[in-house]
Image (spheres, rainbow, N blue to C red):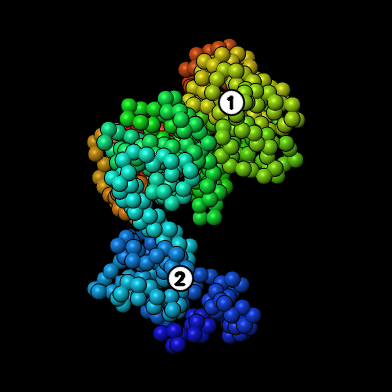
Amino acid sequence: MAEQVRIGDVLVAEGYLSPAQVEEALALQKQDRSKRLGEILLDYEYITEEQLLVALSKRLNLEIADFTRIEVDLQAAAQVPKALAVRYRILPLGFKGGRALLVVNDPLDVYGIEDIKALMGMPAELLLGKKEELLKALNKAYGELDSRRAIEAANMSVAQEEGDGDQDVAAGDDTAPIVNLINSIIIKGYNDSASDIHIDPFEKTILIRYRIDGLLIDHMTLDSKLSQNLSARIKIMAGMDIAESRIPQDGHFKIRLQGADVNIRVSTMPTVFGETIVLRFLTQLVKIDHAAHFGMNQENYRKITRILGKPHGILLITGPTGSGKTTTLYMLIESLLDKPINICTIEDPVEKNIPKVNQMQVNLPAGLTFETGLKALLRQDPDVILVGEIRDGRTAETAVTAAVTGHLVLSTLHTNDAVSTITRLMDLDVQAYMIASSVVGVVAQRLVKKICPHCREAYTPSEEELEFIPEARSLWKGKGCHNCDYTGYRGRVAVHEILEVDSAIRKMISRKEPIENIYDYVSREGLLVPMGDSVKKLVLEGITTSTELMEHASMIR
C-alpha cells in the first residue's frame, strides 16, 4: 500500500498543495531523513492535519475516526504495550470479524502497523485519527487499563502480606503495588478531567470516586486492609504526619502528568473505619465557555469591566464550594497584567503561578494567616491585592480597610447570591459604613451541568417542569453514553449575577436598612439579572436540563 501512495501527489490532486511546494518540502526532507514528508509538511505549515487526513482518507478509502462515538475495548489495548502504541501512534480499538481495529495517525507507517498486527496475531482494519485526539484516547484507555491492573496487584498483595506494607511505602519503593495503585488513581482522575478524587474507607471495602462535572461517580472498590497503606503513601507525598491519624490534616504535592505540572491538594479526616481522603486537582485544565469574557455573557462582562476599572474598592466573588470562584479570580487578575501596576496575592494554597504577580501562600504553622499576610502585603506598595478567601471577621475587616485606603481588593466569600453578601459581611462584624464605602461589586456564580452533545435528545416537558418553564414546548436531556459516563451530562457552564454597588445601595447599607429593601431596589431598577433567570434561558436553549433549573431555583432567591 505504501509503495502505491505518494502523499505529495495526493495533496496536489486535492488542491491542498502546488507541485512547487511539494518540491520544497522534499528538499527539506533531505535535510532530515528521520521525518516523513507528511511530518515535514505539517511542521512547516504547508497543510493542516485535517487536510492531510482527508487526502489520505480519500486515497486509501479509510474512515476518519470520530472519538466522541467510539469506545475502546480494553482487551484489545491490553495486547499492545503502551510504550509501543505511543511510539507508533496506534490505538488498538477492538475486534471486528477476525480483524483488529486500529486507529492510526500515519497509515503509511508500514513497519509500525505490521509490528502491532504481529503482537495481536491477526490482520487489521485501519481508521484514521488526529494526533492529539488519538493520544488523548490512548492515554485514557491505558490509564484505565493500568488502574485495573494496579487494583488487582494491590488486592493480591493484601492476600500475600497480611498487614505491613507500610515499610515499602515509607521507604519510597516506587515498584510497591500501593504506589502504582495511587499513581493510576491520580492519572485516571487527570485523564477524566475530575476536579476531586474521594477515597472513602468502610468496614470491608474502600470506595474510590471521582467528581466529574459536579457529579460524584463510583470507580472502584478495594480491600479495606489497604486503607492504612493508602493513607500513609498519600501523606508522604503531601508532606503530612504519617503517624497522626486522630485529627484532620491538610497538605499538597506537585506531580508531572503528560508534560504538565499538576498541583494536588490533600485533605484527610478520621472516620470510624479509617481516614477518608480527598485529593483536589488545583491546576486541572478546563474548557471555559466565553473564556475571553471571563465565562460571562456580554451584559455581565460589561459590568465586571466597569468594576475592574475602579481605582480602589473590594470586589467579591461568591458562591458555594466548587462553583469556580478561584478560576474567575485568576481570570480577572490575568486581565490586569498588561497594566503598570503591582499585583500581590495571599492564597491557601497558590493554585496557579501567574507571571508578574507576587504570590504568597498561607503557612499556619509559621503563623502566616490570611489576616497577617494581608497586613504584610499592605507594606509592599500594592495596587491590586488578591485574598484567596475571606474566612473570618478579622480578615474581612483588614480587606475592607485595604479597599478604602486606595487599593483594589479581590476576594471570595461563601454566600447564596450577590445581595446577601452585604448581610454576610455584617455577620462578620464589619461596620456598615465600612461596607458601604468599600464594596464596589459582587459577583455570585454557579456552575451548571451541560447536556452531553453526543446523547442529547428532545422530549415533551412534564406538568411539574411546565410550572417552572410555562413557555417550553419541548426540552432536552442526555440519555447517557460512554462519552459522559452514562450521566447525560458533559462539561459545565458558569452562570452569574453581578451587583454593581451604586450610591443608592451605599446609602441603604449605611442606614442599615433591611436587606429586602436592597432586593426590591435592584429588582425594580433592573440592576441585576438573577442566576435563576440565566439558568432558565440555558434550559430553553437546550444547553442544560430542567433538573438543573429546579436544583438551582431552591438556592437562588
In the image, is 243 to the left or to the right of 124?
right
Tell me what residue is drawn at x 48 percent, y 62 percent: 132
N-term-proximal mark, 1 vs 2: 2
Image coords of residue 453 (percent x, y):
36, 53
Residue at the disc numbered 2? 88
Q: Nearer the viewer, residue 226 or 89?
A: 226
Is 392 on the left or on the right of 209, as rendered?
Answer: right
Look at label 2 and name its amino acid: Tyr
Front-most of residues 388 and 174: 174
Does the residue at mark 1 contact the one at mark 2 (Cβ under 8 Å)? no
Query: Quick one: 463 or 487, which is closer to the camera?
Result: 487
As drawn, the label of residue 350 is none
Task: Report the residue at 67% width, 44% height from top.
Answer: 355
- In the rendered image, is residue 278 in sight? yes
Can you identify the residue that label 1 sits on?
Answer: 365
Three-letter amino acid code at the position of disc 1: Pro
Is residue 335 rendered to the left or right of residue 518?
right
The image quadrant where one finds the N terminus is: bottom left
